[in-house]
Image (tube, rainbow, N blue to C red):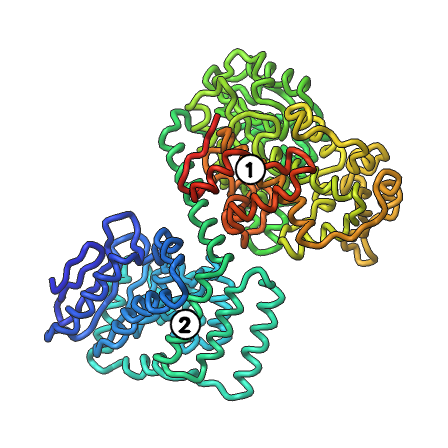
Amino acid sequence: MIFQGNSLSAQLLDDGIVELKYDAQGSVNKFDQATFEDFRAAVDAINNCADAKGVMVTSGKPAFIVGADITEFLETFKQPEDQLVPWVKAASDVFDSFEDIQLPTIAAINGFALGGGCEMTLACDYRVGDTTVSIGLPEVKLGLMPGFGGTVRLPRLIGADNAVEWMSTGKAHKAEQALAVGVLDAVVKPEVLRDAALNMLKAAIDGKLDWRAKRQPKLEPLRLSKIEHMMTFNTCKGMIAAKAGKHYPAPMVTVNTIEAAAGLDRAGAMAMENAGFAKLAKTEAATAQIGIFMADQVIKGKAKKAGKQAKKAVNKAAVLGAGIMGGGIAYQSAYKGTPIIMKDINDQALDLGLTTASGILTKQVERGRMDAKKMAKVLNNITPSLSYDSVKDVDVIVEAVVENPKVKTAVLAEVEDIVADDAIVTSNTSTISIDLLAKDLKRPENFCGMHFFNPVHKMPLVEVIRGKDTSDETVAAVVAYAAKMGKSPIVVNDCPGFYVNRVLFPYFAGFSHLVLEGADFTAVDKVMEKQFGWPMGPAYLLDVVGIDTADHCTGVMSAGFPTRMAKLENDPVSTLYSNERYGQKNGKGFYDYGTDKRGKPTKVPAETAFELLAASCSDKKDFAADEIIARLMIPLVNEVVRCLEEGVVASAAEADMGLLYGLGFPPFRGGPIRYLETLGLDNFIAMADKYAHLGEIYQVTDGLREMAKSGQSYFSTDVKKA
């Protein structure tokens, strides 16, 4: 052993080969500050080993190296940009020093080699992967670019156009894809990976492979003619501008960096990369996207913990109520391997549910994401039934009938008498109190809410709603089932609207206020989509949710929070509802929906909607974009803060992910709490105070003022007041 650290070791094997083995004390290998220190020391040890003839990089884990330690990033990135440049240079210099070892080097890659893990392999002369390999540079998904030499080495290895595609999309690539483009030199079965790498390295040591010639292009400028340079980078920038847009700077900074460094040697190109990385590290988008990654880890961690704590495994499920929602739930459960009974009271509903599931599967087959055999297997996991007898032996029931408390209460009581005493019963309700639905149940401890979002197969979030009598065992089992379905569950406490809908309706109220004051709903939508970044503006979202559904929910929220969310007089939503404009479901709402000559969906502002609203709204008035954003976002953020203070949602991370995964909150803003902290608590309070006269939804809590005064962060402080 020529070096032994906590994260890696360097051992001299037979024939003068040094095995540089990454084998961290945790479950995965990653680049943190301690690993960099080991890496630097290992390179020195190899350089000082007179008997060394070649280096083979391996992993002692099922995955090669998963990347850098993201948990260190946010704190580090608070440093000024001029301090970040030497910080990242110090890290990238270690990779350069490894690449400069005057011996042939090879990486034997297994499993994931992402981010810094991929960059580790690029610093080697040769790369052999096994068939389990997933390799790529996903930094763009964190609002960053590669910082350990990826923008320098990859373009010189596979060409600038291929490299830009890899880095601007952040996709991970399978072994055969990486082989085809030239990232890997060979792909072998896992059991022969080590031998294959050793044999290739020995060939390089013996002079049968020219490792110096293989390395040299990575040290030189890119080999592009002027025409190739212009065509490559102009094309790449055009595609990136169209796809990424102005809110996500990382892809464009990446391609600009590669272009600027194209004519430079490695040292010059690395300096460009260091500067580009530091620049992106200081952007709000990077802070937000790194925050999302970390918040997602919180949710995954809690789901994993629930899986270990759950005393009841869910091996068979049932959904009551077919139709579109029931069909979506059935598809999701079946697709992820849990057989499910889809029970309804009539064949037409069952047909609709099966059609929904098969329609989703057919699209998967058409796009090449699934074969017919897999589709048949998923459909065979769904059993349609008209009889309650079919659900007697299931582990969990998801009730998904009409959103009516009397109907739901009757169905829940009925099914409770049929299933086993330890079966878990849940309700897929979006607004009805779980405690209300549980009041006539014999085993309320086995009951909770399981709120899916539509369309089920696309929306990642599931709200698991705990009632006052719901047991911890029930919550754990349902969270584990939701995670098994491929969903991201957050646990919330029962209250009107639960979490997501509760904070959405003050946002809608802010929109209604604006329209009543003369705002053009199309102008509001444009600002909230193009400038703030929502996938849909409020008017369009109301049409998609359903004007009838929104009007009903407004009543529920008004009853639950009568002083803060009282129903507005002449509410535009109610006006459209009373005139039977229900949104997309009947083709008319704020917008008119139809199809063009080619059969593509159309959406045009409805003249009828303008006419109906004119009767109760002030004369048309133009509002500045900043005011539109403030008037809608202040009520939403205030309500999120209240939910945290009341313990409706447990943490800022879950509050953010709830809206990201349930509503499509703009990822580059990181979620409502990240948005609040990016604005600055004092700045938000000043902005909200400006509109406080408009009502309670604009008035910040005392708790928020205390947080601002003490300089605390919601991500590190328990703010529960209730």
Q: Taking 708 as reference, is 110 above or below it?
A: below
Query: Quick one: quadrant of the N terminus?
Result: bottom left
Q: Where residue 69 appears, x then y in whole percent?
A: 34, 54
Residue on which disc 1 sits: 640
Q: Amino acid at mark 2?
A: Glu
Residue 31 appears anywhere in the view? yes
304 sits left or right of 403 in the view: left
How many dots with numbers? 2
Q: Quadrant of residue 477?
A: top left
Q: Which residue is tagged 2?
A: 273
Q: Nearer the viewer, residue 324 or 471?
A: 471
Return the disc, 1 or 2, that comes first in the chain's sequence: 2
Decide if residue 644 is on the left or right side of residue 631.
left
Question: Which secondary structure lies at badge 2?
Answer: helix
Query: How far is disc 1 from disc 2 in space, using C-alphas?
Result: 39 Å
* Residue 128, visible in the rendered structure: no
Q: Residue at x 38, y 80 (%)?
A: 268
Q: Secondary structure at mark 1?
A: helix
Q: Nearer the viewer, mark 1 or mark 2?
A: 1
Residue 94 in picture, x, y percent from top left: 27, 69
Image coordinates for residue 166, horizontal then vertical, percent? 48, 67
Three-letter code, disc 1: Val
